Amino acid sequence: MTASAQEQAPVISLVPARMDRLPWTRFHWSVVMGLGVSWILDGLEIQLVSAGGFATTFHMSASQVGFTATVYLIGQVLGALIFGRMTDSIGRKRLFILTLAIYLAGSGLAGFSFNITMLWLFRFIAGMGIGGEYTAINSAIDELIPSRYRGRVDIAVNGTYWGGAAIGAVATIATQNLFSTNWAWRIGFFIGPVLGLIIIYLRRSIPESPRWLLTHGRAAEADRTVDEIEARVRSRGVQLPPVPQEKAMAVIDYPRVPLGQLVHIFVRQYPRRTILGLTMMITQSFLYNAIFFSQGNVLKGFYGISEANVGYFFFPFAIGNLAGPLVLGHLFDTIGRRKMIFATYLISGLVLAVSAFLFQAGLLNATTQTIFWCVSFFFASAGASSAYLTVSEIFPLEVRGQAISYFFCIGQAAGATAPVIYGALMGDFSSRGPLTIGYLIGAAVMIIGGVVALALGINAEGQSLEDVADPLSKVTLPNAA
């Protein structure tokens, strides 16, 4: 803490406690609808690119098509790094408006590309916007949602990525049947911006996080924001109980966290939490990239499914991934974080391991293989979504956006190795042995992630964010008991 910070008169506030005592209201639905679209858009983007209709228009090679996906992921990483730090310093609301606008511009303009270079440039811009969304949105949702609902909401919202992927699959089939190849992929890229324009209107009514305001010298504005939210609740006839004064928190305006202190927080102050977050992000990213990017080739190379029919097998896979967080999410708030993370990672790994042995024995066909993937990722999707929840809630508010961005980038980097590894294991599809070993490795990776979560996890269910990790701006008053 700087000398100037130490000299500040602290502000004593009930803002966090007041936010957590709120019942579920229309306001919270507006937060979910307005902010949760980010992952739908990401899933939509990935699916549209995987369809690859632009490859015919621009006569692209396989490596050029692959780079179109890669450049989007590079943009995500850079966007997360840049905007993660900005969301901690200038606020959540400014960033979730800015990042969505960047995405709208990048994706919309991609549909007007007339050469490969333009396509790659706009895909990079769209990726930057989505990368920034990951940091600003996770931070805002966790700070605006009452503690007893935080787990299920965050997990469900992150899981909607697969809703976007399913929409993308349907959109791809529809546009390819209704329009020429040159127009089909262009129209596909316009779907995201059309949805985004609707959502950016909804986001205008979502306030800045009162928690962020409180810790950045804007306590009066934080109080006014909570007053307005409470007024909406009372206008619907809901009686709010008083908040005990002992839940008040004393804070000061905390300066921007320098990189040196950020390293200290991750390495010295919270080393176990850093290991936990990294393990969860890396393991889920590795498994998802391994299966998702090899799924089509496995169906075509080992089961003889035509290119035109692969999408029909992807759709139930996407629905299974969407259903997991929606069905299991509330258990992370009731049974608890550690137990549920362990269970979802473990079951996902075990189901994948069983399918690996059946795959090696030649006992599966395309349908039964897809069923095993659906079951495994029903649990893996809930676990993967909980990774973002975990990283978001276990570090101090002042570095929340940056924590998400750095852990996301490291997870993406580790996961990026999986498609290369599994592509090599498939080879010319003449032998199932190497890929079987790959599946068993993927299963072991998930099980290890679950064991680490059980050993190092934080029982954050039902707890205020400020109880899970003290804000850096929090101070102890001299006369405090």
Image (cartoon, helix red, strand yellow):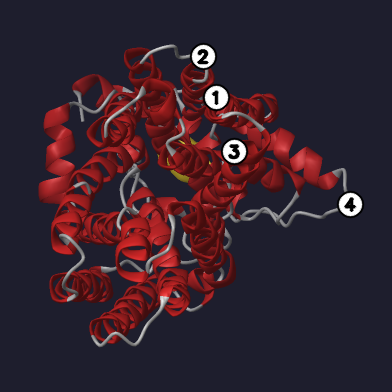
* Residue bearing the label numbered 1: 186
Residue at 40% x, 74% y is: 376
Q: Nearer the viewer, residue 413 or 172?
A: 172
Q: Quadrant of residue 399?
A: top left
Q: Which residue is mark 3?
A: 176
**Residue drawn at x 32%, y 14% as measured from the top left:** 117
Q: What residue is shown at x 24% (from left), y 57% (from top)?
A: 286
- Disc 2 marks a residue whose amino acid type is Phe
Q: Which residue is tagged 2? A: 112
- Amino acid marked by disc 1: Arg
Label 4, on which residue? 237
Q: Are marks 2 and 1 in contact (CB under 8 Å)?
A: yes
- The mark lying in front, picked from 4 and 1, is 1
State the separation of the CA atoms marked 3 and 4. Answer: 51 Å
Q: Point out the image quarter for the N terminus.
A: top left
**Circle 4 crowding by C-alpha within 10 Å: few under 14, some 14–19, many from 20:** few
Residue type for callout 3? Gln
**Mark 2 or 1 closer to N-term?**
2
Precedes in sequence: disc 3 or disc 1: 3
